[in-house]
Amino acid sequence: MDLSCLLLVAILALSILYWFCTKTFDHWKQQNVPSVPNPRPFFGHFLPVLFIKESLISFVHKIYQQTDASMIGLFLLRKPILLVRDPELVKSIFQTSFNKFHVNGFDLSEKNDPILVKNPFFTADLHLWKTRRARIVNHLSGSKLRQLFVIAEEVCSKMCQFNDRKIKENGDYFECELKEFFVKYTGEIVANAAFAIQGQSYEDNPDRLAFAVIARKLLKPSLMNALKQAMLFYFPEVGSALGIGIMEKSTDNYFRENIKLVLKERKRSNVAPKDFLQSAIEANGIDDIDSIIADAIIFYGDVYETSSTTLAIVIYYLSEYKDIQNKLRTDISSKLQASGGAVNYDFLKSMNYLDQVIQESMRLLTPAGTLMKVCTEEITLKGFDGITCNLKPGTRVFISLTGLHLDSNYWPEPDVFDPERFAPENQANRHKFTFMPFGEGPRMCVGMRLALMIIKLAIVKLLLRYSIEQSSKTKKPLVLDATSFLTYPKGGWWARFKKLSD
């Protein structure tokens, strides 16, 4: 074959490839849905996210800000994606038409992720999801949360002892990155309650196989974790074929062996401590190892990462706004005195101003700033501006929680930190689906009450003991780390803890 023929074949092959990569790019135009201009062949609009140059949360928020329309179309590779901006449409997706959007969009295989695939968050089958979710809800009833409170309070004491030691070592204050500080707290709770082991979170040199070390490795922002998550999120079929799972085999084995040892000991001693693991044993039967481990990992997912992120966000804002920190501390102290001086489960439930501070913090920096749903049945959506869109099964729908939470149409001066937004009198006329940090509808975060208990307990204990100061180590303005699936800024959130004067 001469050079001219080779050139002709190459041009033809490239033309076919170009046609294949771009033939769907008129999808939104055909439906008269506004769309982001200039999708790139093969990549669509997601080039900066795919190359880990920008976080998905920041990217989707920017798209949200580009229009005032109720919805906007874009392309992930060559697949049409719909970004919904209308709170009524969000309500339809999460609640009214839930059965047509019940899939979250992370496709895990039983072969590559045998434990995580049992998590209700990743379960696509509606019947299986209902069964698994109901079991977890039972594990987190009010009476069982009270039992878990005892464990969380013990870990809180370890956290404060650790803080005191570090302050003493440094002379005046302890300066730390807040996410790393709080994964010690949430990690130790998970180790104690879900795995019945000591996590060594507050030891300066934990064993290399300590729970604190293994658990942090699983979800810590890194290029490798980002690549794995991107593969499973954007190329699920390829990721599955390559044997890629979120949890490495060694981590799976670590959790499995620890659980087996604890189960063996509980069988031998016939002792049943009141912890999350025992609840999982009673629900599944002591011989159903996979289901027990799956429940423990669900506890890990609901507590370890999102709760530590939320705590870091709240404490960061309290360090930035000393007037609100002082007001909250005064409110805690006065209510504690009125209730007899005991910080317990019921006391935390009565802390309304603390709720407002947490809500406002999660509005400004939402841990999971972007949510995704997959359409499972054909449906027509109609926005507030009359735009209609016919969705086919398999179409992905994005919801920018960050966009909704910072939208000036719903939040006056949206960039201002003001917990009074969440005072009861200020919430009456606000659309419910303009604030949903834990999601909404039937698939709302199953561990929300547990997470809030753990978060509120830590904040109360810290504010009663320490003044929280700003740190110059926080890089401003905050830019989200592209390697983190959750909200996390480059360089982290930093603060200083100083003992309060007696």
Image (tube, grey):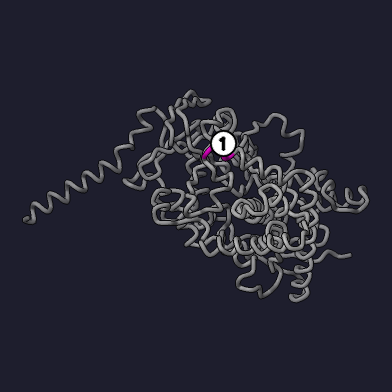
Q: Nearer the viewer, residue 210 or 138?
A: 138
Position of residue 136 in the picture relative to residue 172 (left or right): left
Position of residue 16 in the picture relative to residue 192 (left or right): left
* Residue 381 image offset from top left, x and y in percent: 49, 26
Q: Quadrant of residue 405?
A: top right
Rendered-image quadrant of the N terminus: bottom left
- Residue 126: in magenta span: yes
* Residue 411 image offset from top left, x and y in percent: 64, 37
Q: Quadrant of residue 437?
A: top right
Residue in the picture at 60% in, 34% down: 409
Q: What type is the residue that disc 1 sits on?
A: His
* Residue 213 appears in the picture as rendered: yes
Question: Would you name the residue on which mark 1 appears?
Answer: 127
Give the farthest residue toward the front: 268
* Residue 377 image offset from top left, x and y in percent: 47, 30
Residue in the picture at 9% in, 51% down: 5
Q: Which residues are magenta?
A: 125-129
